[in-house]
Image (cartoon, helix red, strand yellow):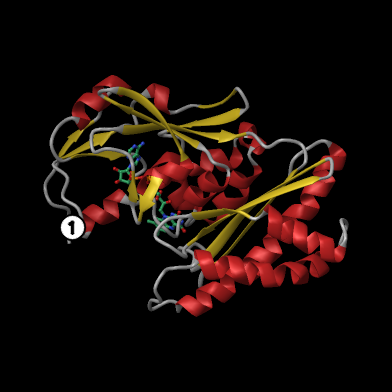
Amino acid sequence: MKAAPFAYVRPGSTQDALAELGRDGAKVLAGGQSLVPVLAMRLGRPSTLVDINAVPELSRISRDHGTLRIGATVRQRQVQYDAATAAVPLLRMALPWVGHREIRSRGTVCGSIAHADPSAELPAVASCLDATMVVAGAEGVREIAAGEFFTGAMTTVIGAEELLTEVRFPIAAPGEGHGFGEFARRHGDFALAGVVVRVRTRDERVDARVSCFGVSDHPVSRDISGELQAALAAVGPTPAEPDLRRALAEHAERITSDVVDTGGDAHASTAYRRRLTAGLLAREVARAYLKSLRSAEEGTSR
Ligand SMILES: Cc1cc2nc3c(=O)[nH]c(=O)nc-3n(C[C@H](O)[C@H](O)[C@H](O)COP(=O)(O)OP(=O)(O)OC[C@H]3O[C@@H](n4cnc5c(N)ncnc54)[C@H](O)[C@@H]3O)c2cc1C
């Protein structure tokens, strides 16, 4: 099938892009890796594609006030390899799992977050780190926390006439350790289930947060500091990874029975997704905690 007819514009500034988005039925074109298949299958029929790739101010990666700022046309593969992005280890852990190299060469980080596929990795990273989305529109610029950004499957708070201009990810602090795990039938497929974990160890304090994806209509985040502390009380503060994993298993089952609410489909039942998520969660929290201990000692983040 071919796409339905559409107009194509390629503005050279954010202001001009916003003016074009004011037209009825206009849609942003970033990397095109999700939008073009949608058009080709006629699942969407926008009147105008607003190609933002010629807007210079949207193509930057920069560090500013403890955040890594990624502009709307920055490719996923660029983020995977740019030296500046080492400051947010979770991005580099997640990106190799996003589709294939060819997809990442065109696909953008902001496009993935704006598209908000429930099984996508980057929205879950943004949720776990509580990244800030910067959205521009005719009325001005809004900064939206990840917790308020994703509202359902392929749905966010971005209005039809608005543009996600950048995402700001907090730079990892010393004492942080991270975990990322997903399961897909073939590498590069969307995940059946996945988890993103951040653990922070400071002095005697341990904080942990997880975001699960592929298990609900949007990434689901939970503060699991209490569960990690309870597991550590059972195995001591410097456990071997398998011991901590075992101590976390019961907590992980309880957490996932709450967060996994997707119905079963042709790929996996709800019960299978719960078991999968619980296993990934216990493993990645244990790994992230042990990394956080090392990074606290070294004064780095991992
Ligand atoms: C074979 C294949 C496998 C894939 N596997 C995975 C995978 O495993 N995991 C994964 O996460 N993704 C996967 N993807 C999707 C890929 O990551 C896309 O690149 C990404 O979802 C969308 O980014 P894009 O820049 O291509 O956006 P586009 O395709 O250009 O746009 C996607 C949607 O977001 C909107 N949009 C884009 N940018 C903005 C913006 N700045 N402001 C407002 N709205 C915007 C568009 O209007 C459109 O509705 C796969 C894609 C393919 C083709």
At horizontal 85% and vertical 65% (from top left) the residue drawn is: 235
In x, y percent, where is residue 3? Answer: 17, 53
At horizontal 49% and vertical 67% (from top left) the residue drawn is: 260
Q: Is residue 181 above or below residue 132?
A: below
Residue annotated with mark 1: 42
Relative to residue 272, is residue 6 drawn left or right?
A: left
Q: Is residue 96 above or below residue 54?
A: below
| Crowd around label 1: few <14 · some 14–19 · many ≥20 (10 Å) | some
Quadrant location of the C terminus in the rendered image? top right
In x, y percent, where is residue 247? Answer: 77, 69
At horizontal 27% and vertical 22% (from top left) the residue drawn is: 139
- At label 1, which amino acid type do we have? Arg
Q: Is residue 151 above or below residue 175?
A: below
Quadrant location of the N terminus in the rendered image? bottom left
Relative to residue 24, is residue 161 drawn left or right?
A: right
Task: Tell me the quarter of the picture where residue 277 sits.
Answer: bottom right
In x, y percent, where is residue 9? Answer: 20, 31
Task: Tell me the quarter of the picture where residue 67 sits.
Answer: top right
At horizontal 42% and vertical 69% (from top left) the residue drawn is: 262
Nearer to me, 232 or 273:
232
Circle 1 SS class: loop
Count of numbered tags? 1
